[in-house]
Image (cartoon, rainbow, N blue to C red):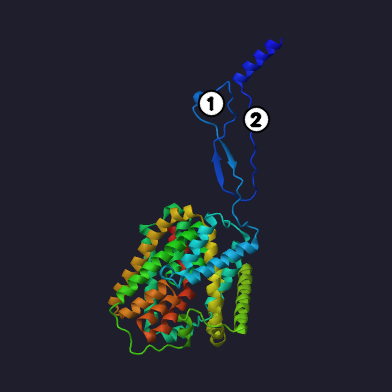
Amino acid sequence: MASFCSRLSLFSSSLYPLSPPIISLHVSHLPCRHIHFTVPLSTPSPVSKPLLHQSEKRNGVARTLKVRSQLRYPIIAPDDHWGIWTVLFATGAFGLWSEKSKIGSMVSAALVSTLVGLAASNAGIIPYEAPAYTIVMEFLLPLTIPLLLFRADLRNVIKSTGTLLLAFLLASVASIVGTLVAFLLVPMRSLGADNWKIAAALMGSYIGGSVNYVAISEALGVSPSVLAAGVAADNVICAVYFIVLFALASKIPPEASTSTNDVAKEMESGYDGKLPVLQSAMAVTTSFVICKTAAFLTKFSGIQGGNLPAITAIVVILATVLPRHFGYLAPAGDSIALILMQVFFAAVGASGSIWNVINNSPGIFMFALVQVTTHLAVVLGLGKLFRFDLKLLLLASNANIGGPTTACGMATAKGWGSLVVPSILAGIFGVAIATFLGIGFGMMVLRHL
């Protein structure tokens, strides 16, 4: 009997070799990276061949189990609010610092902050989604818009800019034409419903600036990955475009006098001066009041996505009606807004996926390239037809594509002292109108193409 049982045991073990239980891996409930392992369902015995080898012979495929590794990602959890905010502000500060280097000055602080945020989230340091990002989008971004537009006195713009304002309006029309041509040639179908939205946002950026790009994207509901890809493509295009503009302006001599007033000095100084505490407090408080008023009016009227356009309209009206009061707050507003915008770009990068940016950027990059190229061709062509001075055309185009700061920088660098202040005011005028033009053109034209 014992001999029979021992034979039966040996026979059974040869067919079904004994194996220890599989050690279960700890599964974290936090976001983590996935790793695929091929795990044999038993260990080989001295009597038989490995079961995995037998399985391959019988079935031709190895069974796999998908398990999660014990490494927890991201390193800074979504609910670690102090950690997330530290990374966002540190990234924004690094972006501002980078502009003092050769490489950073070529690509801009906005692109540096976006790319660093993108790298940090994709490397598993910070999460793709966190409550802090929502706070940036819903509160800090709207708070930034009034701070940027305290100088938007439309009467002063019209009175002070003169012929440059006409050149700027011509360049704005060129941006609209460039958007239409680019969308017909490079429709970005791979982006789905985001294609016309990102086109409208880029058009707003090439009339006003980054704040208009963000406002239009938020109003139209552009997805975070496409938003980040658009920022990356836009900044690269702008860096190349400014080189082209300076090349075209290389033979234009400087003016005899290069004096500037206080507004120009504040803009070109890089916001290095000390800010009065009371002035800063009043600027932030005023911005909060404007944002609250806009939120109430938007909710009362039931307009979806109308928060940022309403904020823009209110601050432009107030700056035009009360230019002296808002002009007093402008220096503090500029500096605070500059910091908050860098935090925003860091959050945009952090919420994006590198693979999505890589997949989306080529199409957006080609679209923006055609858009800006058409813009320049129309500006130079119509400018020559209407006999505008080349200096005015190049400066107006700079104010369109880059905004008031880059236009001021070009006028200063070229020694066109009489055009420094008008270029700033023209750029501010573009920021004031670009959000409405971008949303309107997108909804009425691009959406139906």
Q: Residues within 10 Å of mark 2 (few under 14, many from 20)?
A: few
Q: Secondary structure at mark 2?
A: loop
Answer whether residue 248 is visible to the viewer in this image: yes
Mark nearest the camera among 1 and 2 is 2
The answer for how far apart the CA atoms under marks 1 and 2 are is 18 Å
Q: Position of residue 357 (x, y in %)?
A: 46, 56
**From what the image shows, is residue 205 above or below residue 154?**
above
- Expressed as whole percent of the image width and height from the top left, the position of residue 223 reads 52, 57
The image quarter containing residue 145 is bottom right
Q: Residue at x 61, y 22 (%)?
A: 16
Q: Amino acid at mark 2?
A: Pro
Is disc 1 in contact with disc 2, using a CB cutoff of under 8 Å?
no
Residue 136 sits in quarter: bottom right
Seen from the viewer's position, the closer of residues 12 and 318 is 12
Query: What type is the residue that disc 1 sits on?
Result: Ser
**Percent from the top left, x then y, of residue 334?**
53, 78
Q: Quadrant of the C terminus?
A: bottom left
What label sits on residue 20 in the rendered view?
2
Which numbered disc covers residue 55? 1
Where residue 71 appears, x then y in whole percent?
Answer: 60, 48
Which is nearer the eye, 194 or 5?
A: 5
Residue sitting at the far right: 1
Side of 223 where 294 appears, left or right = right
